[in-house]
Image (cartoon, rainbow, N blue to C red):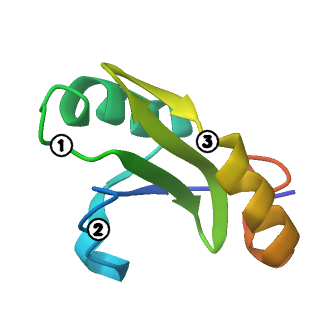
Amino acid sequence: MATADKYLVFAGKAYYPEGGWRDFKGIFDSLEEAREFLDERLVKSVWGPTWADIVNGLYVVCCLERRGDRWVEDEAQMRVLRREYPHLVAQDPEEKP
């Protein structure tokens, strides 16, 4: 299995989703860097995003929601994606299409 070279972060507000590339926030060399970006940059703003997805190639690696000053896994959203779009969900975060 190949290792992913980049992780893309998409994030937005639940009430005002932009959609597609307008929700794009950055590209990172590792999953850890993407998570650090979310923790350090996007959670500090009161008016910042309330959801985030980290994508590797064509696969969704994780869905997150903001609770207060931290990001937590959005298991409900991942269950929906696994059920409705199983071909878009990474079984392994390091998986690459």
Residue hosting label 3: 74
Q: Which mark is residue 96?
A: none
Q: Earlier in the sequence, mark 3 or mark 1?
A: 1
Distance CA(mark 3)–CA(mark 1): 17 Å
Task: Return the x and y of residue 15 as percentages of the image width and height.
Answer: 28, 62
- Residue at the image point whose x is 71% and y is 42% from the top: 75
| Amino acid under disc 3 | Asp
Nearer-N-terminus badge (2/3): 2
Could you tell me which secondary element the residue under label 2 belongs to? helix
Which residue type does callout 1 highlight? Answer: Gly
Residue hosting label 2: 23
**Relative vertical location of residue 37 with respect to residue 21 in this rendering, above or below:** above
Q: Is residue 16 above or below residue 37?
A: below
Work out how far the residue at label 2 is from the one at label 1, CA to CA, in angstroms: 12 Å
Indicate the quadrant containing the C terminus: top left, top right, bottom left or bottom right: bottom right
Residue 89: x %, y % from top left: 76, 64
In the rendered structure, the answer to whether residue 37 lies left or right of residue 52 reads left
Residue identifier under label 1: 48
Amino acid type indicated by mark 2: Asp
Residue at the spot 42% in from the left edge and 40% down from the top edge: 34
Q: Nearer the viewer, residue 39 or 13?
A: 13
Cα–Cα gap, marks 2 and 3: 18 Å
Q: Residue 32: in sight, yes or no? A: yes
**Residue found farthest to the front:** 15
Q: Quadrant of the N terminus?
A: bottom right
Query: Percent from the top left, x then y, of residue 26?
Result: 29, 55
- Disc 2 crowd rating (10 Å Cα; few below 14, some 14-19, many 20+) is some
User: Circle 3 sits in a helix, a strand or a loop, which is it?
Assistant: loop
Q: Are the residues flagged by discs 2 and 1 in contact, CB closer than 8 Å?
A: no
Query: Dot 1: what SS?
Result: loop
